[in-house]
Amino acid sequence: MDDPYHWDERVDAWAEVADSDTFRGIRDRICAVACLRADDDVLDLGAGTGLIALAAAPRVAHVDAVDVSPRMLERLGAAAAADNITNVTPVIGDMRSLPIEDESATVVLSNYAFHHLTDADKELALAETRRVLKPGGRLVVCDMMFALSLERRDRILVMQKIAAIARRGPAGILRIIRNAGRVAAGRWEHPSPPEEWRRMLEDRHFVDVEVELLENEAGLATASRPNGT
């Protein structure tokens, strides 16, 4: 399965990020906005080590946690077992071609996964999301939402990121140089700005589309699949 980011080798690093105050705050925001109910069947896209899936599980009927990395899902499964959570199913899969049945989820959640996809692949993943959602089902996505542009917010975010990395010393400077090379070669991450998220969701015929900017580079997109279609 295509995994250019080598997530199997980054389990510990991602678990540390997911355990930060920032990401726990994002987790709580996603779950609150999703208005989770006891009868919901939830799909977590890019589940990683289980930040969202394990928080949602006690509130819903079932969670399918999809990720491209078997080792991420192993960590998720171990955490679920440690907490006696039995309604989470780890699923190895690609967001662009989900191994999930049509109209089987009432809620789809995702946190900081879509920016690893190109724009074209985001479109595929959103089409798949609509396919697996039941009519009336809800979508809540948190992701990086900015562009490498000259717009004021984008410029500020990029400069803040560069400054934060540079403070790490020589290793940080080396990372900045490497990231610049990846950007030039088109191999860096692929965040999309808020207006692009709105367009993509509306083009996929979602309704009730809302996009909200959060702290730092994050944004929250919510939408629904229309009833009867």
Image (cartoon, rainbow, N blue to C red):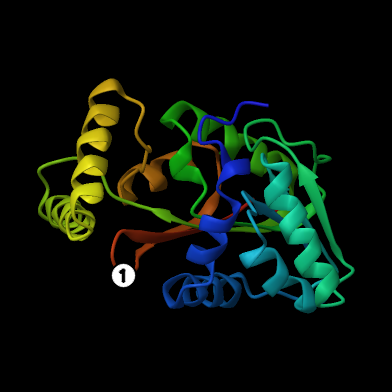
The N terminus: image quadrant: top right
Disc 1: CA contacts within 10 A as few (<14), some (14-19) or many (>=20): few
Examine the rendered structure and indicate whether residue 98 appears above or below residue 57.
Answer: above
Question: Which of 219 and 201 lies nearest the eye of the viewer?
Answer: 219
Q: Is residue 224 visible?
A: yes
Q: Is residue 65 visible?
A: no
Taking the spot 51% from the left edge, 36% from the top edge, the residue there is 5
- Position above or below: 209 against 62: above
Whole-percent x and y of residue 147? 25, 43
Residue identifier under label 1:
215
Image position of 117 (left or right of 163) = right
In the image as oriented, which residue stretches furthest toward the front?
Answer: 170
Write the residue at 56% across / 36% down: 6
Please name whichever residue, 113 or 173, is drawn nearer the observer in this view of the structure: 173
Res. 211 image quadrant: bottom left
In-image side of 97 versus 114 (left or right): right
Query: Residue pushed farthest top?
Result: 185
Between 147 and 82, the one lying in front of the other is: 82
Figure disc tally: 1
Element class at badge 1: loop
**Quarter of the figure that contains the C terminus:** top right
Q: Residue at x 9, y 43 (%)?
A: 150
Q: Is residue 19 left or right of residue 153?
A: right
Q: Quadrant of residue 38?
A: bottom right
The picture places residue 27, in percent across and down from the top left corner, at 55, 71
Image coordinates for residue 71, horizontal then vertical, percent: 71, 47
The image shows residue 156 at horizontal and vertical percentages of 13, 57
Rendered residue at 34%/68% (across/down): 214
